Image (cartoon, rainbow, N blue to C red):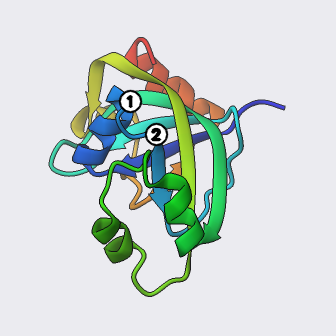
Amino acid sequence: MSAKVLLLSVHPVHAEKLLNGTKRVELRRIKPNINAGDIVVLYFSSPVQEIRGTLKVEKVIGKRLTSLWSNVRNDAGISKREFDDYYSGTDRGYGIYLNSPRHIRKPISLSELRTKWARFHPPQSYRYLSAAELNMVKAVGRNL
């Protein structure tokens, strides 16, 4: 079984922390269908609007918020207040543990993605990439 590939939109502040290793868990309100060993292509959302790297999924956890916070507080790269604000209105959340961060040599801008990939729109949160889409991203990224 081959690895799934997830194109994940992340705010630039948090995306940079993921790539430099100071943040190891990406928090989500909705659980993507991914497992250990799957690949995450990291899209830096506005104002940066570029693909800048990849990571591997170590594990995904889903828990009630009090338990989730106690599990992720040292690796999420955010404060308890930010955590509470993000999860306001829900009682369950998900943490995607990521490892093996890899910067690409030449980031892929939104305009370049749209030139090479007809009708490309960055995902609001995430989307799965087909093999053909991943190959296109690899070709544009040259070392993805």
Tell me which amino acid carries mark 2. Answer: Arg
Residue 99, percent from left and from top: 53, 30
Residue situated in front as seen by the camera: 36 or 106: 36
Q: Describe the element under mark 2 as helix, strand or loop.
A: loop
Task: Give the answer, above or below, for where 90 lies relative to 30.
Answer: below
When the figure is inspected, residue 138 is found, relative to residue 125, above or below; the finding is above
Q: Which residue is mark 2?
A: 24
Q: Residues within 10 Å of mark 2 (few under 14, many from 20)?
A: many
Q: Amino acid at mark 1?
A: Gly
SS of the residue under disc 1: loop
Q: Is residue 63 left or right of residue 135?
A: right
Res. 46 mark: none
Q: Is residue 114 visible?
A: no
Q: Residue at x 35, y 50 (%)?
A: 10
Q: Residue at x 32, y 76 (%)?
A: 85
Name the residue: 23% across, 38% down: 111
Classify 111 as above or below 71. above
Q: How many marks?
A: 2
Placement of the C terminus among the 4 image quadrants:
top left
Question: Could one spot residue 75 in this view of the protein?
Answer: yes
Mark identifier at residue 21: 1
Q: Left or right: where does residue 68 sit relative to residue 54? A: right
Where is the N terminus found, in terms of image quarters? top right
Considering every residue shown, the one lying at the far bottom of the view is: 89
Q: Position of residue 141 (x, y in %)?
A: 38, 19
* Occupied quadrant, residue 95: bottom right
**Picture residue at 44% right of the left edge, 45% below the top:** 75
